Image (cartoon, rainbow, N blue to C red):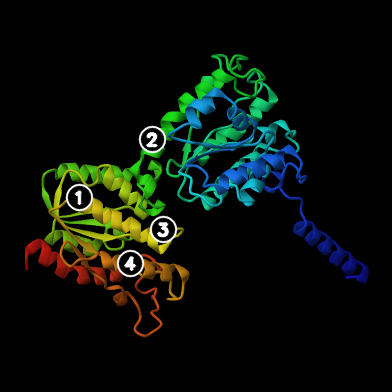
């Protein structure tokens, strides 16, 4: 190769690297203010709202653009949202796009207080202020998703009510309407029914032929008073439901939260069939937990067969569950239709984003629910099993902190502590978790379930057979 070719190659690589390092940012997720000038109305409104935030904020917060901003001056706002019991705070800013909301969130708009519900509707200006060539539906979608992510980070205890972008443009074939529809098709998928709830009444705003009425949206963008009344009728029942929930005072890990049904509706159906087929029967043991407990029917199936030959067992372990999912299941039917002598509980390893204290609070609530619904039963409480090979792993450390807390829930009578975690580990001070017991450093194999069975069988004998 000639020297000039080598030089050209180096130059080309350098140019490529510079392009990668200094690529143009995606504007919809790049936080910027509408204006940097302190005397600009936008900065003045932001400063005014920050003063309200410093006073403690509100249990209900609306975030958005001119559609939310415009709600603030209406009779609907004064009578339905600003008044008791909501005392809502309006953080709508006319003209805002997703990047402006992100800037506001980065500069303290949700700091210093704990909201119970955040109502979000944003994105119409991303479409209205830019052509499709400058901002695609994907850009708007990822901007909305980033706002949701940031709200959840800033206000983890809050429920988010997500509105799709309101329809705009008089006719369904309006180019902006079509872009809104494309964004909304994906945005609706951001609601998980757990922390993000969809409030979608767009069809009510439209005529039968898909056109927008001037009576509802005079400029085919902003709702009239009639449009705001429609909005309030759709939103108020959801606000009331979320705020009246007793779960609002619990941390997320202890708050009843359903999983998206497609993920495990098959197993839920099978468990209900088992329960109903044994209705009125007194079981010996009910297993409660996540995939590790579910795994008695997988890697542990041979060991499980031997246990089931000696005891009447119902396995309510569901792969992927966190503490809040058990709370939801147990408050919504899985504690019903049977009696049992003993529960065996091990849960919490999937709560990766929760603190040890919050995970422990979730476990405590599960124990309380079982004691209330099954006062006849005792609880065999297991620590979260070790995971990851290295004892210094952050997840392992957090699980151990959780275990230290929940150990205090055992009273030796109704709740019995059963800790055999060291049996899974290699001898020595390093507490190494071997793959010979947990091949993925999380789920026991057949040998792991043998260790589990040997540790708990004496308790089964004592509390189920009286031996």
Under circle 2, the secondary element is helix
The circle on residue 405 is: 4
Q: In the shown orientation, is residue 292 left or right of residue 18?
A: left
How would you rate the neighbour count of disc 4 (Cα within 10 Å): few for under 14, some for 14-19, many for 20 or more? some
Residue 225 position by quadrant? top right
Sequence-wise first label, 2 or 3: 2
Under circle 3, the secondary element is loop
Residue 68 visible here:
yes
Residue 59 is situated, as x and y percent measured from the top left of the image, at 47, 42
- The answer to which of 204 and 410 lies nearer the viewer is 410
Q: Nearer the viewer, mark 2 or mark 3?
A: 2
Q: Nearer the viewer, mark 4 or mark 3?
A: 4
* Image quadrant containing the C terminus: bottom left
Sequence-wise first label, 4 or 1: 1
Q: In the shown orientation, is residue 66 left or right of residue 360?
A: right
Cα separation, mark 4 vs mark 1, equals: 21 Å
The circle on residue 372 is: 1
Q: In the shown orientation, is residue 11 left or right of residue 205?
A: right
Sequence-wise first label, 1 or 3: 3
Q: Which residue is mark 3?
A: 351
* Image quadrant containing the N terminus: bottom right
The circle on residue 241 is: 2
């Amino acid at each position: 190769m000639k020297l000039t070719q080598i030089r050209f190659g180096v130059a080309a690589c350098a140019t490529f690297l510079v392009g990668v390092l200094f690529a143009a940012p995606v504007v919809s997720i790049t936080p910027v203010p509408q204006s940097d000038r302190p005397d600009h109305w936008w900065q003045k409104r932001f400063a005014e709202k920050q003063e309200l935030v410093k006073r403690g904020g509100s249990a209900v917060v609306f975030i958005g653009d001119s559609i939310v901003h415009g709600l603030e001056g209406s009779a609907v706002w004064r009578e339905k949202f600003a008044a008791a019991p909501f005392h809502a705070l309006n953080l709508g800013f006319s003209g805002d796009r997703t990047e402006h909301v992100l800037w506001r969130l980065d500069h303290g708009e949700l700091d210093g207080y704990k909201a119970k519900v955040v109502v979000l509707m944003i994105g119409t200006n991303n479409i209205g202020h830019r052509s499709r060539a400058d901002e695609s539906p994907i850009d708007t979608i990822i901007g909305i998703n980033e706002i949701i992510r940031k709200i959840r980070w800033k206000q983890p205890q809050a429920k988010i009510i997500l509105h799709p972008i309101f329809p705009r443009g008089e006719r369904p074939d309006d180019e902006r309407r079509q872009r809104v529809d494309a964004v909304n098709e994906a945005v609706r998928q951001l609601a998980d029914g757990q922390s993000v709830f969809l409030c979608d009444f767009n069809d009510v705003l439209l005529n039968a032929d898909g056109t927008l009425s001037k009576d509802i949206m005079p400029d085919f963008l902003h709702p009239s008073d009639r449009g705001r009344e429609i909005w309030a009728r759709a939103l108020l029942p959801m606000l009331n439901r979320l705020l009246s929930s007793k779960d609002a005072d619990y941390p997320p890990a202890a708050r009843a939260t359903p999983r998206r049904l497609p993920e495990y509706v098959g197993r839920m159906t099978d468990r209900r069939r088992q329960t109903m087929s044994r209705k009125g029967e007194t079981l010996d043991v009910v297993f409660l937990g996540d995939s590790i407990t579910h795994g008695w029917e997988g890697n542990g199936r041979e060991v499980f067969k031997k246990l089931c030959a000696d005891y009447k067992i119902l396995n309510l372990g569901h792969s992927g569950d966190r503490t809040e999912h058990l709370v939801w299941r147990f408050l919504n039917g899985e504690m019903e239709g049977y009696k049992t002598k003993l529960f065996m509980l091990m849960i919490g390893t999937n709560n990766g984003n929760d603190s040890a204290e919050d995970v422990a609070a979730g476990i405590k609530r599960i124990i309380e629910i079982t004691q209330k619904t099954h006062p006849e039963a005792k609880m065999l409480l297991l620590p979260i099993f070790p995971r990851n090979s290295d004892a210094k792993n952050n997840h392992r450390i957090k699980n151990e902190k959780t275990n230290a807390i929940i150990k205090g829930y055992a009273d030796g009578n109704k709740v019995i502590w059963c800790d055999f975690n060291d049996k899974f580990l290699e001898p020595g001070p390093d507490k190494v978790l071997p793959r010979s017991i947990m091949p993925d450093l999380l789920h026991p194999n057949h040998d792991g379930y043998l260790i589990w069975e040997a540790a708990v069988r004496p308790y089964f004998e004592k509390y189920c057979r009286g031996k």
